[in-house]
Image (spheres, rainbow, N blue to C red):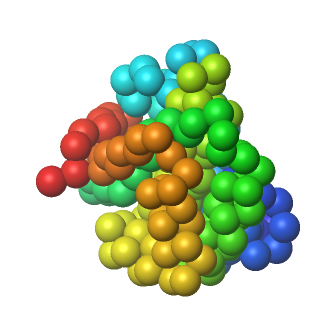
Amino acid sequence: MNDKLVSSPYTEEPHLLDLRTLDIPNQLLAKALTGLKCLRPDYATAPYIETLNWSEVVEAVRGLAEAEAFSWNEEVSFFIVVFRSQIPPTTIYANLGVLDKAAHAEANQSGGFLKYWFGSPDVDGRNLATCVWRSTHDARIGTVGPAHKIAAGAARNHYTEWKIERLRLSIKNDAREWSITNWI
């Protein structure tokens, strides 16, 4: 078994997810999330639940659980962060990418960062990025380092607008039932 998983657009060592640090439900979701993909061209502004192929991801979780004879009896929740943004035409997107990559490596090293996905800005500069974490605790730890602070600070100067949504992905009943709801 390969213990390292590509869980983001970044494929270098500091960006790889170490599956050995996760329990079985988190390993299964992380593996299934390698198939996460966008379903529509207006993903930057469309309702989140309709934007990505969550049904297929959970179906993959179910298949992986069955293949490993893992009984997913209890409900397990995961923390999702959605970052919607708009950049003006004057922003150099590659510069934001450098900050993003450093923040991702830092967050990944903190543990519990299961998936990072982002698109490209549309013609109006709107974009969507999403992170799936093992828990809110992991997300807090992963977002307090210096690289993340610099990237977050760039939002004030390089984005026309930005918004963060916090969601809960819940999977239960042998991965036959799932929901994405607001995190409360």
Q: Residue furthest right?
A: 12
Q: Quadrant of the C terminus?
A: bottom left
The residue shown at (76%, 75%) is: 14
Q: Residue furthest left?
A: 184
Q: Is residue 99 visible?
A: yes
In the drawing, does residue 62 fall left or right of residue 147? left
Q: Residue furthest front?
A: 90
Q: Position of residue 99 (x, y in %)?
A: 66, 65
In the drawing, does residue 138 fall left or right of residue 67? left
The residue shown at (66%, 40%) is: 90
Q: Nearer the viewer, residue 62 or 7?
A: 7
Q: Quadrant of residue 179?
A: top left
Q: Nearer the viewer, residue 126 or 113?
A: 126
Q: Position of residue 43 (x, y in %)?
A: 52, 24
As drawn, 78 above or below 134: above
Q: Residue furthest top?
A: 41
The residue shown at (61%, 70%) is: 103
Q: Position of residue 1 (x, y in %)?
A: 79, 66
Q: Is residue 19 visible?
A: no
Q: Position of residue 10 (x, y in %)?
A: 77, 58
The residue shown at (24%, 39%) is: 181
As drawn, 65 above or below 5: above
Q: Nearer the viewer, residue 122 or 75?
A: 122
Count numbered badges in the picture: 0
